[in-house]
Image (cartoon, rainbow, N blue to C red):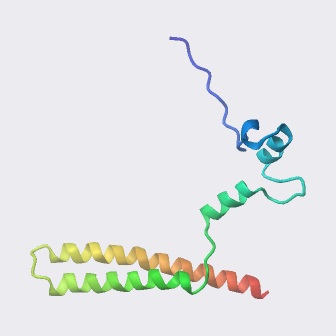
């Protein structure tokens, strides 16, 4: 079998002319900016998916409650459960609680950074 040429991957994503409607908008969309110099909707949407903006205290309530619940389950499994594997279950619940606690801490840190950058 003959060798297949490998295609070079470009760092920018090119839009097709059929999807955008005309050739001029294809060139603009592939650069990530519009004619006025602002970012296109697809580039903004892609960045918002990677790093969602926190909404404030509302985004802290759920991870805090889940983390506290997981810590409570870890303690109850480890000390009040009569199964022979109660330490295993408690350890898994504690691992889950650590993950939710880390998620909560990251959200708190991100919210504090946003508040300090807006107050400057």
Against 83, is 65 above or below?
below
Q: Residue 61: x, y in percent?
A: 48, 85
Q: Nearer the viewer, residue 70 or 27?
A: 27
List the single residue furthest toward the right.
36
Q: Quadrant of the C terminus?
A: bottom right
Q: Residue at x 58, y 19 (%)?
A: 4
Against 27, is 47 above or below?
below
| Image-based side of 19 in relation to 72, left or right | right
Q: Which residue is drawn at 76% across and 88% down?
A: 119
Count of picture labels: 0
| Image-based side of 27 in relation to 97, left or right | right
Q: Residue 20: x, y in percent?
A: 76, 43
Name the quadrant containing residue 7. top right
Q: Residue 36: x, y in percent?
A: 90, 57
Q: Which residue is drawn at 70% across and 39% down?
A: 10
Q: Which residue is drawn at 61% across and 84% down?
A: 56
Q: Residue 41: x, y in percent?
A: 74, 57
């Amino acid at each position: 079998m003959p060798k297949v040429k490998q295609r070079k991957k470009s760092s920018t994503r090119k839009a097709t002319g059929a999807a955008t409607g005309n050739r001029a908008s294809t060139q603009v969309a592939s650069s990530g900016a519009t004619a006025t110099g602002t970012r296109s909707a697809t580039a903004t949407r892609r960045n918002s998916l990677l790093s969602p903006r926190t909404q404030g205290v509302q985004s802290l309530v759920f991870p805090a409650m889940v983390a506290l619940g997981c810590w409570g389950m870890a303690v109850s499994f480890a000390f009040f459960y009569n199964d022979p594997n109660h330490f295993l279950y408690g350890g898994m619940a504690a691992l889950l609680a650590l993950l939710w606690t880390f998620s909560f801490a990251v959200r708190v840190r991100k919210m504090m950074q946003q508040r300090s950058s807006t107050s400057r």
